[in-house]
């Protein structure tokens, strides 16, 4: 009987890529991947700790598996495990495998070994790592888009962020390995490659290959011209003329950027150790939209940073309200032990942070409504990802990341088809497939 393995993932796209690598490794070892709620011999929990809530969710998952599957082997990895392995050990009176981010390439072999090595050896000093973990992925289960991790780690040390301490310094995947992984995804018929990392704009700077994120994106677009290339997130200072020219030049580079803001107030940005001003961020956004009028831009914003005054919060709101942003990801500031911001004066009470979060989320709702309305009547090329269980409608994302729902036959699933956005229903854009595409894909 095959060894049954269940894997669950919290957090970012890089974690999702790495969990897919674990699944590929277990399958190569003749194991059976089963749903996480099913009975398994090995449970892998890929944790997150970017916020206090994410850390809490990680602990809850570990406790739940310990309670429900007492005889199983449990492997805990990811950023929560990296940050506080002792806290993970304390959750259980039975042995656990705790594997740090710098040793994820050893996870499959360790989990399948009859003799577990010294757990401390599988943590390591992540800030001393100088090379990226090699984690090849064969396929993403039940996905039409594949995440392609090109980089790991961060050297920015924003004062609120624990990631440099859990992910280590910036490390890049060599170009040949990036192209090999992309080729594997293409062979598996993924129609879109989402380029991801912890700080993708720093790609190549630690290698001696002479590559940058811009030259890499150019090569991916040229090598795979019939496949969609999407960039997951990039810092404001890395959105430059090189990137915009690439997006103009290549039809398969999707017109969608996610650019984190965090705060629109200059004094808060300085306390965050973010190296730009609100005016500079606004100039970047306007330059992108002038160059690529149909693009969608999303951004992250952090509400309630220590010492943030009502006026500073208002500056953030006003900046975002005045920009053609398509959507916002809004987070309350979360105090992370070990970061500089955790010791700053002026830690704000929860109700103050929540009010500011809710106001920004209301703005997000309005931004999305405007974006959806602007697209009514337009025809988009949509990658059809799934059929909704309740409504029976197909759904997928357009080039500019519009989440469209529409009726259609099952043979267009996992295909790219033309869809006309006809309106907005229940807050979501809806449409119809252009007849010519129905005939071509049949």
Image (spheres, rainbow, N blue to C red):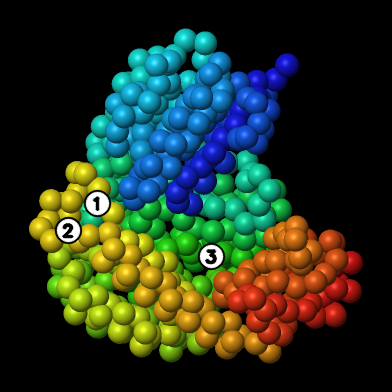
Q: Secondary structure at mark 3?
A: strand
- Residue 106 appears at what percent x and percent y? 45, 26
Cα–Cα gap, marks 2 and 3: 37 Å
The answer to which of marks 1 and 2 sits earlier in the sequence is: 1
Residue sitting farthest toward the front: 351
Left or right of 325? Residue 253 is right
Q: Nearer the viewer, mark 1 or mark 2?
A: 2
- Residue identifier under label 2: 347
Quadrant where the image shows the C terminus = bottom right
- Residue identifier under label 3: 230
- Residue identifier under label 1: 335
Q: Is residue 96 depicted above or below 273 in this figure?
A: above
- Residue 129 appears at what percent x and percent y? 29, 37
Cα–Cα gap, marks 3 and 1: 32 Å
The answer to which of marks 2 and 3 sits earlier in the sequence is: 3
Q: Is residue 356 depicted above or below 321 in this figure?
A: above
Is label 1 in contact with label 2 (beta carbons under 8 Å)?
A: yes
Q: Residue at x 80, y 71 (%)?
A: 407
Which quarter of the figure has residue 285?
Answer: bottom left
Is label 3 in contact with label 1 (beta carbons under 8 Å)?
A: no
Q: Secondary structure at mark 1?
A: loop
Which quarter of the figure has residue 160?
Answer: bottom left
């Amino acid at each position: 009987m095959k060894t049954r393995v269940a894997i669950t993932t919290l957090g970012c796209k890089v974690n999702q890529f790495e969990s897919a690598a674990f699944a590929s490794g277990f399958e190569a070892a003749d194991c059976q991947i089963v749903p996480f709620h099913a009975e398994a011999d090995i449970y892998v929990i890929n944790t997150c700790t970017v916020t206090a809530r994410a850390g809490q969710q990680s602990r809850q998952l570990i406790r739940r598996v310990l309670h429900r599957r007492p005889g199983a082997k449990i492997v805990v990895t990811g950023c929560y495990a990296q940050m506080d392995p002792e806290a993970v050990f304390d959750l259980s009176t039975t042995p656990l495998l705790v594997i740090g981010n710098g040793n994820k390439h050893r996870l499959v072999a360790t989990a399948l070994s009859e003799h577990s090595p010294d757990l401390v050896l599988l943590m390591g000093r992540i800030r001393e790592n100088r090379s990226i973990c090699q984690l090849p992925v064969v396929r993403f289960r039940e996905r039409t888009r594949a995440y392609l991790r090109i980089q790991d780690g961060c050297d920015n040390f924003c004062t609120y962020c624990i990631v440099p301490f859990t992910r280590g310094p910036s490390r890049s995947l060599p170009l040949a390995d990036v192209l090999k992984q992309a080729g594997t995804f293409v062979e598996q018929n993924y129609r879109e490659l989402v380029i991801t990392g912890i700080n993708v704009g720093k790609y190549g700077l630690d290698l001696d290959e002479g590559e940058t994120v811009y030259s890499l994106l150019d090569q991916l677009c040229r090598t795979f011209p019939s496949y969609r290339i999407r960039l997951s997130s990039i810092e404001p200072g890395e959105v430059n003329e090189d990137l915009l020219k690439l997006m103009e030049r290549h039809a398969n580079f999707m017109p969608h950027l996610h650019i984190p803001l965090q705060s629109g107030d200059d004094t808060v940005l300085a306390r965050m150790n973010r190296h730009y001003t609100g005016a500079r961020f606004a100039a970047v956004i306007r330059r992108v939209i002038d160059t690529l009028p149909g693009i969608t831009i999303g951004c992250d914003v952090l509400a309630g940073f220590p010492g943030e005054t009502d006026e500073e919060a208002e500056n953030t709101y006003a900046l975002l309200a005045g920009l053609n942003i398509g959507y916002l990801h809004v987070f309350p500031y979360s105090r992370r032990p070990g970061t500089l911001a955790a010791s700053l004066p002026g830690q704000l009470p929860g109700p103050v942070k929540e009010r500011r979060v809710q106001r920004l989320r209301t703005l997000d709702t309005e931004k999305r409504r405007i974006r959806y309305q602007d697209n009514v009547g337009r025809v988009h090329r949509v990658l059809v990802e799934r059929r909704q269980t309740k409504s029976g409608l197909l759904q997928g994302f357009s080039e500019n990341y519009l989440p469209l729902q529409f009726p259609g036959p099952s043979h267009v699933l996992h295909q790219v088809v033309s869809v006309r956005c006809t309106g907005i229903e229940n807050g979501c854009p809806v449409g119809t497939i252009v007849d010519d595409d129905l005939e071509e894909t049949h």
